[in-house]
Image (tube, helix red, strand yellow):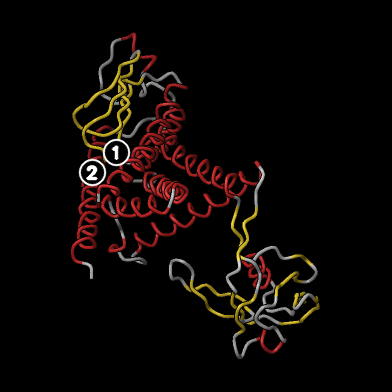
Amino acid sequence: MGHSVFAFLIVLGILIFFHEFGHFFIARLFGVGVEKFSLGFGPRLFGKKIGLTDYRLSLLPLGGYVKMVGEEPDEELPPEQIPLSFTHKPVLQRMLIVFAGPFFNILLAILIFWGIALAAGVTVLQPVIGAVKEPSPAQRAGFLPGDRVVAIDGVPVEGWEAMADRIHASLGREIAVTVERDGERFVLRVAPEPAVTRNLLGEEAPRYIIGIGSAGAVETRPLGFFEAASESLRQTAGIVGLMVRIVAKLLTGGISVDTVGGPLMIAQMAGDQARAGIASLFQFIAVISVNLAVINLLPIPVLDGGHLLFFAIEAVRGRPVRLKVREIAQQVGMVLLIMLMILVFYNDITRLFFSS
């Protein structure tokens, strides 16, 4: 348990630091004064004041915040602090300051995946057939377990995923598949057939297939600097897309809210990943960082997305949303956030103490 708590604090600390540093960095870039940069909420444990900013570690580790000069629209400021005021900056600058937190979480994921790709390369599932379904187009065409797919329609195939995508792209048109068997190469012609598969979210995904299964052979390929960068962007974009779809399905009832987890589940998973190795732990941090970014961009007051919504309305109307409206929206957003926290803690406790 202690191992999980320690791993959880490391994960949370990195995520919070990057998120709040994003707000801080862009705020200072635009000349906004920052009064407090806090990791954690509640009473100040210790810290150091440098210039205007009090850099502090606070008691409750479940979050953090950046307190800027003039952050509250109705706050009275002395004339000398007006140039440092967040509220007095152009609306586009305020939007960029708010957006910077989630963006830096995305940037963290990109940097982690980039570093791992540079250090360890990328693992590719080889296009080696382990099973041939009977009956299937592959069985009728003469494919056998152990065959290695080399090319499709003369275009080389580098991995199982690329092979499957090319088969699907045929949309049932007959394709020429070059296979290697016992050191010899020859071409088999096969017409893929439509089938219904399920993706990671359990959604039905129509695909064209030929009826083969992977042998599970993998290869680790080293990547250069720019190749690793491209791979990190691809992985991060994939996780962002997946998270957006998960959130959408949660909101529409496509996924049960029972699957939502909170700090206890994250602590348990962080401990598991830490035991699996430093690379696994950092991959976990990258995934949770993207999760945090997507959640924070939801248009709910008290979240970054809620502030961005109000600023977008201000940009269109040419004047801020009335203070009373914002106060009511903030109260509603806080209630929603508290309800979400109750839900995730309930799910965590149920999993921890009552799961079979």
Q: Residue at x 35, y 21 (%)?
A: 34
Residue drawn at point x = 24 percent, y = 30 percent: 58
Q: Amino acid at mark 2?
A: Met
Q: Residues within 10 Å of mark 2 (few under 14, many from 20)?
A: some
The spot of residue 243 in percent (x, y) is 43, 55
> Which amino acid, mark 1?
Gly
| Foreground label between 2 and 1 | 1
Residue at screen point 28% across, 15% down: 77
C-alpha distance separating marks 2 and 1:
15 Å
**Mark carried by residue 334:** 2
Element type at mark 2: helix
The residue lying toward the viewer, choosing from 271 and 211, is 271
User: Which quarter of the rendering shows the C terminus?
Assistant: bottom left
Q: Does residue 170 lie above or below 14 as drawn?
A: below
Please provide percent x and percent y for residue 182.
75, 78
Q: Nearer the viewer, residue 134 or 144?
A: 144
The quarter holding residue 37 reads top left
Residue name at image x 37 percent, y 48 percent: 295
Query: In the image, which disc is placed on residue 63?
Result: 1
